[in-house]
Image: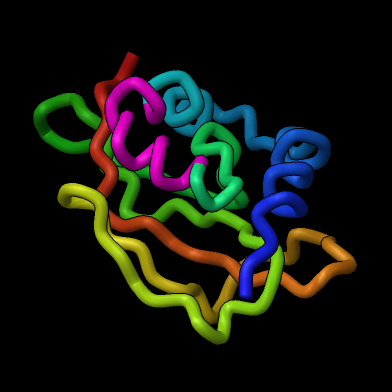
Amino acid sequence: MTNHEKTQSWYRNEAGKDLCQCESCKNYYRNIRRTYPDLSAYLSSLGIDIEKPLETWSVEQEDGKLLYPEAMYVIIGSGDSFQPFAVGNIAAEKEESFPSADIEDEYFVISLHGIVLEKN
C-alpha cells in the first residue's frame, strides 16, 4: 500500500536537496514535465514530482536528443501490490536495485524506461 501524502511531502521537502547538477540531469529537470505531460500527471497522482528523480542517466543520440534509459522515483509505502504500468510509450516497473533515498519510512523505487528529451 502506498502513502500518497507522505510521498508528496517527501518530494516537496526532501527530494530536491541532492539533485545532480550535471548538464544531462539539468536538461531532464527542464524538459521532462513539458515533454511528457500525461506521465507527469500520472506520477503526480502517486505523489511524485517528475522533476525530482532519485537517479537518472542519459545517452546522446545521433539526432541530438538525449535518451534517458532509466529514471528512478521513490514511492513511500509497501511496494507489494505495485503493478508495472505504461503511460504512452514510457513503461514503469518496480526497481530491485537502487541508491538509498535515506528515508526512515518503508519505501520502494520505480524506474521509468525510454524517455527521450530535446537537448537544450
Q: Which residue lies furthest to the bottom in this view?
A: 80
Q: Which of 116 and 58 is in front in this view?
A: 116
Residue 66 spot, x, y in % from top left: 27, 34
Q: Position of residue 83 (x, y in %)?
A: 39, 76
Image location (x, y in percent) of residue 81: 50, 82
Give the farthest residue toward the right: 104
Taking 62 as reference, is 53 left or right? right
User: Which corner quadrant of the image does residue 77 belong to?
Assistant: bottom right
SS majority, magenta: helix
Please name the residue shown 56% across and 29% down the image. Answer: 22
Q: Indicate left or right for 80 with 85 as reference.
A: right
Look at 83% across and 61% down and name the residue there: 102
Horizontally, residue 112 falls left or right of residue 102, namely left
Q: Quadrant of the N terminus?
A: bottom right
Magenta extent: 32-44
Eyeballing the image, is 32 above or below 105?
above
Residue 42 falls within the magenta-colored stretch: yes
The residue most toward the top is 120
Quadrant location of the C terminus in the rendered image: top left
Q: In this view, does 37 lie above or below 113?
A: above
Which residue lies most toward the left here? Answer: 63
- Look at the image and name its color scheme: rainbow
Residue at the image position 49 percent from the left and 74 percent from the top: 95
Q: How many labels does the image show?
A: 0
Instruction: Check residue 38 for magenta coloring.
Output: yes
Q: Is residue 65 left or right of residue 49?
A: left
